[in-house]
Amino acid sequence: MNKPSEHPPAAGETKFSRQVGEQAARKLRAQRHATQTIWSGLGMMGMVGWSVAIPTLLGAALGIWLDKHVHTSHSWTLALLAVGLGLGCWLAWYWVDKEDKAINAPEEEKEHE
């Protein structure tokens, strides 16, 4: 984390003043990133919730319709509810993974520079 600076010190700049400047810059970046993260986190919670809720409800609705029109010994409602829930969980995982990669990509690029 505390890697040495890669640029030569400027005239009159000490190692301590360079470290303080780097810490201040990191703190400012973290503060800007925290505000963005809070709002994107709230948006992501909504996206994850809808990603799970919509397929689950659609599966249940289709199952209820099938149970009324197709008479079988098993429950279409329960089966399609489980399928919708599974699909919704997979969609939620997909969105969270995609956002995690988008958030961490700039940080990883800076570390490799």
Image: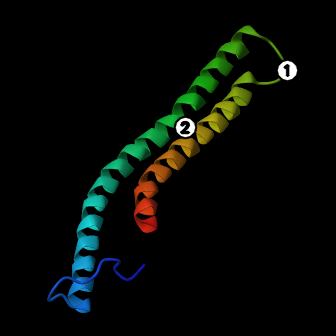
Q: Picture coordinates of residue 52 (x, y %)?
A: 55, 37
Question: In terms of sequence position, does the residue under pointer 1 or pointer 2 come before the other?
Answer: 2
Check the image and name the residue furthest to the right: 73
Q: Which residue is painted at 21% across and 91% down in the image?
A: 14
Q: Which mark is residue 46?
A: none
Q: Picture coordinates of residue 61 (x, y %)?
A: 60, 21
Residue type (three-letter) at the residue carrying disc 2: Val
Position above or below: 107 against 21: above
Q: Picture coordinates of residue 68 (x, y %)?
A: 70, 12
Where is mark 1, residue-wise?
73
Q: Nearer the viewer, residue 61 or 51?
A: 51
Q: Which residue is painted at 45% across and 55% down in the image?
A: 105
Residue type (three-letter) at the residue carrying disc 1: Ser
Q: Which residue is painted at 65% across and 14% down in the image?
A: 65
Q: Is residue 52 left or right of residue 33?
A: right
Q: Is residue 84 left or right of residue 34?
A: right
Where is mark 2, residue-wise?
52
Q: Nearer the viewer, residue 8 or 37?
A: 8
